[in-house]
Structures are given as structure tokens and as C-alpha cells.
Amino acid sequence: MSNFNMKTSLIRLIVTTQCVILITLIANLGQIDALQPPPFMRKAAMARYIVHSTNWSVVSTISRSFNGIPFGSVESSSDGPINNSSGIPYYYISPLDFALKDAMKYPQVTATMSLIQTGYCSSKHYDPEDPRCARVTVIGKLMKVIDAKELQFSQHALFSRHPVMKSWPKGHNFGIYKINITKVVVLDFFGGADVLSPATYFAAKP
């Protein structure tokens, strides 16, 4: 190989390496930005951020199967595609699920989500129970989505964040449900939780 060709190959290698490094840095910056929740003083914004940033929640119901004992179920959730937050937690649930069985009789439920699910708390070395590892609980009725426009949005919200849902067994009769929010409880700092009205919650941007 001539000296010219060797120099050309070396230059290409250096340029390619620099491009890879630059792309990696940009990607890492994006990840850092994604792990920056709102300041703790902005309670409603924090609640919206958590609901949008997490992709599952613990839905607690009054159990029919266990004589009224509170029962928590892990449910995949989404309030919208990554670039479009609605603030409403949507779920894709089968009638075989304890949560739906319970909600058919006792529709009042709670759904709890935490920043521990995003990696933020781990990056700060916060314990899951540390108030700075913010968490939110939404309270309301679990309702089936029936409006055609909302059904289209909620299906896209769920399937874009949980693509595997498209392949779940048709025979299990999954349906799309939402929580009709009546209260939002957010804890993101020391001193106790704050209770927000739906109006305050939905007015904020995540």
C-alpha cells in the first residue's frame, strides 16, 4: 500500500472515530436531559413528569377474591407517546386480571408510579423510600375507554410504548382502560405529600 493510501485510510479512521464519539456524546446528553425531573417546588409538573416518564404502575384495588383486602397489581401503563403526554394513565387489561375483576365491583382504584422506575433515583443514590425519589399516586375510577377518538389515541399511546401488547392473546379479551382522576398525591421532597386537584394536575406540563 502506498504512503498516500495509508494516509487516506488513517484519516478516514480518525474521522470515523470522531464521528462515533460525537454521536455517543450527543446520545448521552439526551439521556442526561431525560433524567432531569422538574424542581420539587413544581408539584403538578412533577406529577405529570412521573406519569409520563414511567411505563408501569401498581394499581391497587379492593379485592373481590380476597374478601376486601387491598390488592396491588403491576400493570403496564402509558399516558401517551413519548412526545405527547395526556396525563391520563391508560392500561391494556384482560378480564382475567385481578385488577379488572375487582374494579368491576369496586371501580375506585389508585395507581402509584415512582422515579425509581426511570433510573433517576439510582443515578442520585436515592433509596426508593427517600422523598427525593419522587412518587405519585393517582386516585379515581377505572373506566373502559369507549370514545372512538380517545380509543385511537390510547391504543397508540400503549402500543408505541409497549409494542409487545400487539401480540397478546386475542382470546384473553384485552381492553383499554383509563383512570378517571379525582385526586393526585405527589411526594417529591421532605415534609409530606401534597394533594392536587385534577385541574391543577392537568394544567401543568410534564
Image (cartoon, helix red, strand yellow):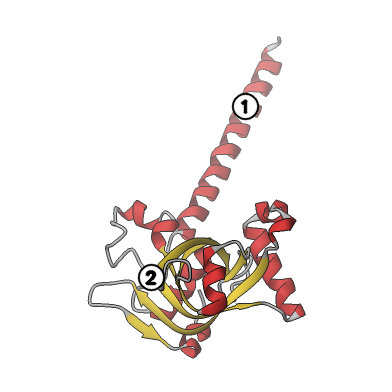
Please name the residue that numbered disc 2 is placed on. Answer: 69
User: Measured from the top left, where is residue 67 in percent x and y?
Assistant: 41, 71
* CA distance for labels 1 and 2: 64 Å
Please name the residue that numbered disc 1 is placed on. Answer: 13
Front-lying residue, 81 or 173? 173
Counting other residues with Cα less than 10 Å from the Cα at mark 2, is it few (<14), some (14-19), or many (20 or more)?
A: few
Q: Amino acid at mark 2?
A: Ile
As displayed, is residue 70 above or below residue 139? above
Q: Amino acid at mark 1?
A: Leu
Q: Residue at x 35, y 52 (%)?
A: 122
Q: Quadrant of the N terminus?
A: top right
Q: Earlier in the sequence, mark 1 or mark 2?
A: 1
Q: Residue at x 54, y 43 (%)?
A: 24
User: Measured from the top left, where is residue 178 in percent x and y?
Assistant: 59, 75
Front-lying residue, 99 or 87? 99
Quarter location, residue 101: bottom right
As displayed, is residue 34 above or below residue 190? above
Find the residue positioned furthest to the left.
Answer: 191
Q: Residue at x 66, y 51 (%)?
A: 164
Question: For numbered disc 1, what is the local secondary structure?
Answer: helix
As displayed, is residue 10 above or below residue 148? above
Counting other residues with Cα less than 10 Å from the Cα at mark 1, is it few (<14), some (14-19), or many (20 or more)?
A: few
Front-lying residue, 172 or 166? 172
Quarter location, residue 72: bottom left
